[in-house]
Amino acid sequence: MTQTNSATIDALARVAEHGKAELIDGVVVEISPTGFLPNYVAGEIYSSLREYARRTRSGYAIGDNAGFVVHLPHRQSFSPDAAFYTGLPTGMRFLEGAPVFAVEVRSENDYGKQAERELAEKRADYFATGTLVIWDVDVLSDDIVRVYRADAPEIPTIYRRGDSAEAEPAVPGWSLAVDDLFPYYPTSTQQ
């Protein structure tokens, strides 16, 4: 992550036109692009949420790079990898308030003690702004989906291959097979 000097949501909007970023402590924190697997995983989650949203009309599936404006003393925005939002549409502007369900998919730089500390702080910020459920998705671990809930923020429910992960109570009745988070690999390439 790189940081640039700024202090407003409008400044974040200008930077975010060229990449993903969040506003934390009055500083625009740019988020590095990710590789194939984390992006693929986020896309699969978004696609499943989109189908759920179309079927239930209970909210909006939000993909990567959307900005959610929040009002904490030290954090003014989130940009999850995928989310489910039940607030009002905001047109071309950032969404107001936190999503009820946020997905953070680990990229190659999201490992180690510092990264774990930052992820825990971000989960606490999500919960402080009204998010009900957070998925911490780590495709390099046997514990692939860790589901954190606002009513038990330190005790994740763990889902592995062969399981179906859910996001209760934020996305009632929705689930996704953990195996669906992994891409198929073609047996041959066609030119």
Image: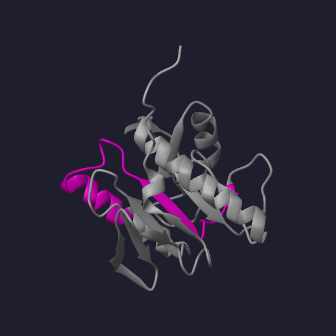
Examine the rendered structure and indicate whether residue 64 appears above or below residue 191. below
User: Within the image, what quadrant is residue 148 found in?
Assistant: bottom left
Which residue is situated farthest in the front direction here?
Answer: 187
Q: Position of residue 23 (x, y in %)?
A: 51, 50
Which residue is situated farthest in the bottom direction here?
Answer: 151
Which residue is situated farthest in the left direction here?
Answer: 113
* 159 relative position to 189: left or right: left
Name which residue lies at 57% across and 65% down. Answer: 71
Looking at the image, what colour scheme do you see? one colour
Examine the rendered structure and indicate whether residue 35 appears above or below residue 56. above
* 180 relative position to 49: left or right: left
Front position in the image: 99 or 56: 56
Name which residue lies at 63% across and 35% down. Answer: 14
Report if residue 167 is visible in the image. yes
Q: Which residues are magenta?
A: 95-121
Name which residue lies at 54% across and 58% down. Answer: 76
Front position in the image: 12 or 99: 99
Q: Position of residue 176 (x, y in %)?
A: 52, 64
Examine the rendered structure and indicate whether residue 34 appears above or below residue 70. above
Report if residue 28 is visible in the image. no
Front position in the image: 6 or 97: 97
Q: Is residue 117 covered in magenta? A: yes
Q: Is residue 52 covered in magenta? A: no
Q: Position of residue 72 (x, y in %)?
A: 51, 67
Q: Position of residue 10 (x, y in %)?
A: 65, 44
Front position in the image: 119 or 106: 106
